[in-house]
């Protein structure tokens, strides 16, 4: 059974947490004591309905303010698929949390209040989802009950968003009218909207095709750990030398010719081991151990690829950076540690090309710094080469984590646009 990771986004009070609560409740994915606690809290607060948003807004500050602050992860499953939900905040000051939640998502659900239509935050979150190359986008027009379930309200918002989406790179866009409070078109099709012929939200989540979203063309295997069981009592393991990691791209099979970077030496795969035993093939996002026919000097941070399909080996990269800390700001000459797949190197900020206004998509080319939650194009010079692809081609080998040299705190996330 495969796993769909999806993130919810949208303006404050558009019903993201209520929608997730409804999904969990209607798919029977919550325990009776959890539901009883939510019902009790709802009564104590004098609310007319059971507030399903309380299932996800776990922080006390979130419950008191009625907003989502941090990214809340929830898990549930249906007979068709397992799901990991990232409930991301709507406020602009939590843009970094939205980026974190959507960075690993296969699909993003952007909620829009049917009464208000598209807002600045709706556009911003849709843009961030496309910047992070989330392959599938769902615009869920919520609170249809408050506009009398009218088709005109839904169609007006769908038309407006379609026009906005032409400025973005959206691979797959779906529109669904819902009422998270009453459950219309969330798990079951709604009788209140006979004019809508599409699937319910859960049906779409269960059936959206994600297998082809992974890059199965470019073989990329960043080595995370070299396994040498020196203390093994089993004679068969005495000479065992395996290279463990997560497949970041392509399909690997025993007998395939592969190249090791940085040495450029070639060999063949003799075996692929997994926790369940030997495998006939490996593909993203499987975690496996490769055994090779020849003894090569391979260590953590190295890359295994195809001889005629190699990633770029570069020390200069241009990337879109989301800065995640208030102090210090990102400026030219800033020194950072860059984590790329399993490789960690030091870096110097050469230049800030522009700062992006994520509300208007305007580029401020005079900007000389990035502050908390700001996004811009940055040029980095690395002390050692990394083996990378553009983020648009492979999210795993095109993403960077930026770390403060002094505190070891994560201060930014970056998506490689050009490497060379």
Image (tube, helix red, strand yellow):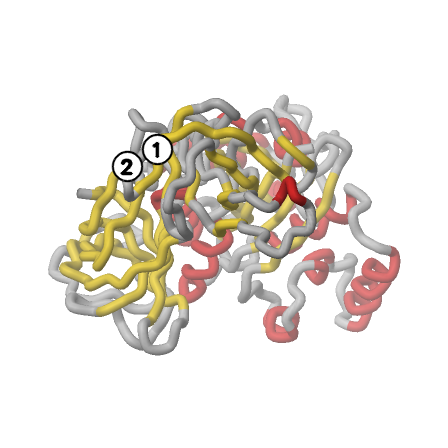
Q: Is 286 or 159 nearer to us in this picture?
A: 286
Element marked by disc 2: loop
Q: Position of residue 387 (x, y in %)?
A: 30, 44
Q: Which of the two labelled residues, at mark 2 and mark 1, occupies the earlier sequence position?
A: 1
- 195 displayed left or right of 367: right
Residue 14 % position (x, y): 56, 53
Q: Residue furthest front?
A: 235
Residue linked to disc 1: 259
Q: Is residue 217 visible?
A: yes
Q: Is residue 124 visible?
A: no
Image point 40% across, 31% down: which residue?
219
Residue 328 appears left or right of 244 = left
| Residue topped by disc 2 | 264
Q: Which mark is residue 119?
A: none
- For the C terminus, the image quarter is top left
Q: Quadrant of the N terminus?
A: top right
Q: CA distance from mark 2 to mark 1?
A: 6 Å
The correct choice, above or below, for 260 with respect to 224 in the image is above
- Badge 1 crowding class, 10 Å Cα cut-off, few under 14, some 14 to 19, many 20 or more, is some
Q: Are marks 2 and 1 in contact (CB under 8 Å)?
A: yes
């Amino acid at each position: 059974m495969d796993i769909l990771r999806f993130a919810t986004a949208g303006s404050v009070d558009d019903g993201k947490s209520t929608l997730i609560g409804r999904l969990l409740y209607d798919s029977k994915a919550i325990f009776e004591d959890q539901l009883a606690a939510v019902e009790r809290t709802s009564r104590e607060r004098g609310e007319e309905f059971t507030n399903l948003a309380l299932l996800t807004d776990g922080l006390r500050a979130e419950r008191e303010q009625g907003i989502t602050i941090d990214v809340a992860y929830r898990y549930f499953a249906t007979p068709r698929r397992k799901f990991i939900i990232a409930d991301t905040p709507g406020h602009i000051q939590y843009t970094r949390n939205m980026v974190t939640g959507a960075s690993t998502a296969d699909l993003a659900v952007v909620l829009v209040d049917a009464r208000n239509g598209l807002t600045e935050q709706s556009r911003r979150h849709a843009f961030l989802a496309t910047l992070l190359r989330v392959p599938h986008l769902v615009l869920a027009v919520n609170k249809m009950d408050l506009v009398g379930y009218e088709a005109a309200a839904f169609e007006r918002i769908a038309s407006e968003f379609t026009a906005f989406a032409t400025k973005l790179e959206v691979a797959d866009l779906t529109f669904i009218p819902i009422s998270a409070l009453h459950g219309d078109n969330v798990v079951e099709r709604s009788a209140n909207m006979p004019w809508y012929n599409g699937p319910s939200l859960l049906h779409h989540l269960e059936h959206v095709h994600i297998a082809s979203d992974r890059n199965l063309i470019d073989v990329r295997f960043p080595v995370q750990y070299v396994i040498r069981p020196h203390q093994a009592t089993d004679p068969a393991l005495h000479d065992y030398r395996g290279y463990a990691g997560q497949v970041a791209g392509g399909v690997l099979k025993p007998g395939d010719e592969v190249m090791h970077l940085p040495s450029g030496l070639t060999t063949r795969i003799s075996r692929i081991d997994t926790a369940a035993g030997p495998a006939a093939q490996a593909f993203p996002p499987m975690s496996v151990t490769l055994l090779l026919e020849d003894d090569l000097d391979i260590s953590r941070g190295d890359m295994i690829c195809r001889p005629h399909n190699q990633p770029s080996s570069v020390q200069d990269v241009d990337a879109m950076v989301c800065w995640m800390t208030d102090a210090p700001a990102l400026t030219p000459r800033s020194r950072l540690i860059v984590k790329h797949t399993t490789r960690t190197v030091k870096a110097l900020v050469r230049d800030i090309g522009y700062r992006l206004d994520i509300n208007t998509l305007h580029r401020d080319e005079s900007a000389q710094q990035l502050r908390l939650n700001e996004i811009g194009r940055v040029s980095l010079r690395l002390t050692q080469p990394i083996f990378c692809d553009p983020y648009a081609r492979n999210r795993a080998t095109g993403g960077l984590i930026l770390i403060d040299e002094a505190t070891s705190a994560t201060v930014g996330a970056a998506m490689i646009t050009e490497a060379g």
